Amino acid sequence: MKRVLQILFGYIVFCFCVCLAVGFFSGTLPELLAKSVYTYRLYAGLRFFCRILPAVTITGVIIGFAVSYGRHPEGSVMRFSSAMLGRYRYVIITGIICSFILTCTEEIGTPVLVSKQLQLVQMPKLAREYVRIGTKEFISGNSDLAFQYAKRAAKFDPKSDSVQQLLNKTEIAIKTSRQNRLETVVPEISQGVSEEGYTVSQLRKLAEKSFSAGNWFDAHYYAETGISVASPKDTNIELLRRIAAAAWNELSRAEKIPETEAERVYKLKLDGYKLLMAGDNMKAYYVFKKLSMQSRALSIDPDIVRYLKLANVRLAAESFFIDETFNLQEFETADNIYFKIQHADGSTDIVYIKGITSIKGTDSMVQYLRGFSVVSLDKNGINIRRMYVPYAKLLAVPVSDFDDDTRTLLGIDKKTEYVPYILLRSIDRSTEGIVSEPLYWYESNTAEIEKDQLILPVSYTDFELLVEASKGAEFMSIPALIQFVGKTVQYGYSEEVFGQVMLNRILYPLFIFIIIVCSAIFAWNYRISEKLMFKTVWVSAFPLLSILLYILFTGLLWLYKLFNYVFLGTAGRKYALLAACGVYAAILIISSIMFLSRNAADAA
Amino acid sequence: MIKSLKKSLLLIPAYIAILLFNCVLGVLIYMLYFNTAGLIAGKSVQLFDRHILFEGFFIVVPIVLLLSGTLLSCYRIRHSGGGILPVITYALLGAVTWSLLYPAFIELKKNYHVISDTKINGLTEGYFRSVDDEIVYFPRGPVSADTDAVVINMNEVQNDAVSIRKINYHRIADGSAPFKDSLICETIPTMPGWIMEGFAAIETRAENAWHSGYIHWLCFMSFGLALFSVYSLTFCSEWRLINIIYLLLMEAGVLSFNLLYFSDYFLSLRKFSNLIGSTSAFLTHLEEPLLISINVFFSLVFIGIGVTAGLTKNRKNKRRSV
């Protein structure tokens, strides 16, 4: 066993070095950052090694066992001898080790290396994109954001002139802006007096006086001013708040034409409040937003702040801001996602998403869907409607939020916990009227209510599976693949394809194990003669054996995939894994028996 | 002597068994491949097809005959020894294969015409299929002609990325050939074209040679001679594993050379061969005299190496026994 492992790992290490050398000295390079060239070549070498590792391993196993059996063939005069049983134990151990290594290479090594190489290829593009966006933000006056982009770009390409320039520019701009802020803000807070020069207690007295006089605007104004200049620990603040609220209540009752600026503001606040109460959250949002942007005093007006926040929260359930989607395309985690949704009435929706950017929110994941299209077909497969929106926002909402009727109407399964809730309308953060709404096309003249929100009648877990499936069955995680296979037809994917890939990947270790046992049989049959001296020149033939075994292994893998289709076709999805396991186990048993039945008559 | 005779006689049934086993195995794999290639998503797989079985027979048998030398050599390495008699039997079996079996098969093939299957199984509806850079979804099926489909064009301007339009069925069928459904060919790698094309080219050459007369067939047999003579190299090493490696590599070399000779790589060599061919009246009767010469030359080299190695080994064994 020791000799086998020595030869096996010795040969693997030798091939590893050769592959690294091949990676370093061959192949054309894509556009890369100067610092990534060596890493890229290293990954290329490692990928090449992963590709030939099965053939290299089998070569090592064959040579190792052939030498080991040749040197110690004793105790195998009869078939099924105890000596062969002892040797079989080592074959099993070697088989397990090799299966483990090769499966890890196939499932982890190669995908990781592919993605790492892809990352390196994307680095220059990303660095350029960060500099571009950063420069754009800097010109727009968003120095903080520009600095963040410059820092990200510096992570990839710290030596680049353009990155350094942006970094310096934004750093200086941030420092200057901080200094200015300190100069303007600090005195105002520390003074604790209003623009007119009143202290908090003076403002309180004025508010009380105005309130007793029934001058609600003044009372509210002084109380609000007092609140805005008072420190949070000020003892007057509570009383000021009460006066402001009471005055506001009185103002709400009073409906008269605004005459002064303060009255106009209060009237607008009142309008905004009424819109909010009426459920027109978008209009209410713009009223308060407009007010808050009018002056610094209004931007910290407690009523405006409070109602703006409330409108914002309510609006988040209806639409999202256009600026949330700026520069998202570069950070997409999945692209070209498509699936169908079959409704109970026989109609079908075909959904296509060009790209998805996932952003971790405060409590849940938010997904921005770029190029979101839905084509609706009736039960006869005839197109009835097409919808497109450049960007949509997807949130996972609990089904428990819906009553039974709504759930049945939407066609949501009882077991489903969360469903994707998609906001189709996006609005500008500060300007009313700038709206990105879904575009609808109808085949007939039937008028329909065009929705701004959409609930997909699929579970959120299924949606995540569909996103993963868009990468291809080979790149899905095995648990996700197993979960998805039963749902493929439901979403327009082929059960045969996903089922076959599932079998390919799950049974791969068993496939390798069988090959190792067969290699041991071959090694016994072609073992080195007991008295024969090992010649150094033979070592040169081992790489040639690896080439032959690479061709053979590729052929066997092709057959293995073909047979897995047969299992799926004959036993169906549910029993395919069982049937395939049974057949491969039978092959393993037969090859094991064949190994155990070897004897010395199989002359060296 | 008896042992040697026994070994050489055993070689005959073993050879027949090897040919039969490989033919059956090859035909089964061929049938399996083409039945899988005929699979359509959502429909059950048909495991047995008489038509494909016949078609497979006429494709697999010439390949097995071509590789018979390699297979028999492998058997001989596994069951080596026995002196000169098994080697003579090996040579006789090779001669019988190339002078009787191969021509007999060509005659048999001439009498049986395989009619290609023209039955079109429509594609099933309700699946997304990848066609070039587009994803196609057929809402109604079975699809066996041009029909309306939802098409997702991944390179299109986003607004027009999804459209409904008529799809050319033949474009899909041609794109996925030999698979009937483009979905299935995504996971089964197609048999490398150069393998099938290579064997088909050899078969065509064989048929042409046979139909052109005995001289031409004799010329073509130089290829068989080269393939069978590689066996001689298995006497080179005392470790049979190394012999197997030499054998398979050299067989691959002979096959590749005979295939690549007709490619553009050897265009100048072929021109040179034509030049030689036109120099004498005898050579004009031969097809590709240079190729024949190379095959014969290498056969002689292999045999020479084998004989030398065999004699050296014999001498060594005698010295050891003394």
Image (tube, coloured by chain):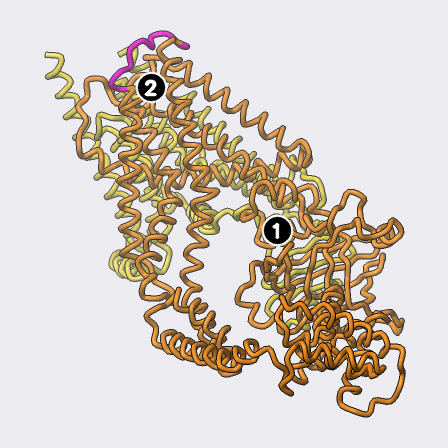
Chain colours: A orange, B yellow
B73 is higher (above) or lower (below) than A240: above
Query: Residue at left 40%, top 32%?
Result: A98
Q: Chain of mark 1?
A: A
Q: Which mark is residue B8?
A: 2
Identify residue for label 1: A469
Q: How would you rate the neighbour count of disc 2 (Cα within 10 Å): few for under 14, some for 14-19, many for 20 or more?
A: many
Establish if A67 lies above or below A505: above
Quarter of the image for the N terminus of chain A: give it.
Answer: top left
**Quarter-wise, where is residue A82 in the image?**
top left
Instruction: Answer whether labels 1 and 2 touch (C-beta < 8 Å).
Output: no
Q: Chain of mark 2?
A: B
Q: Nearer the viewer, residue B303 or A377?
A: A377
Q: What span is in magenta?
A: A70-80
Horizontal placement of B57 versus B258: left or right?
Answer: right
Q: Is residue A205 magenta?
A: no
* Label 1: how many Cα within 10 Å (few below 14, some 14–19, many 20+): many
x then y, percent, for residue B31: 59, 38
Q: Position of residue A326 (x, y in %)?
A: 59, 72
Image quadrant where one finds the C terminus of chain A: top left
Q: Is residue B35 visible?
A: no
- Tell me if residue B264 comes above or below residue A199 in the rendering: above
Left or right placement of residue A174 versus residue B156 in this view: left
Residue A447 image position (x, y, % from top left): 89, 72
Q: Nearer the viewer, mark 1 or mark 2?
A: 1
Q: Is residue A495 visible?
A: yes
The answer to whether residue A78 is magenta is yes
The disc labelled 1 sits on which kind of residue?
Ala
Q: Nearer the viewer, residue A502 or B246?
A: A502
- Identify whether B92 is placed above or below B128: above
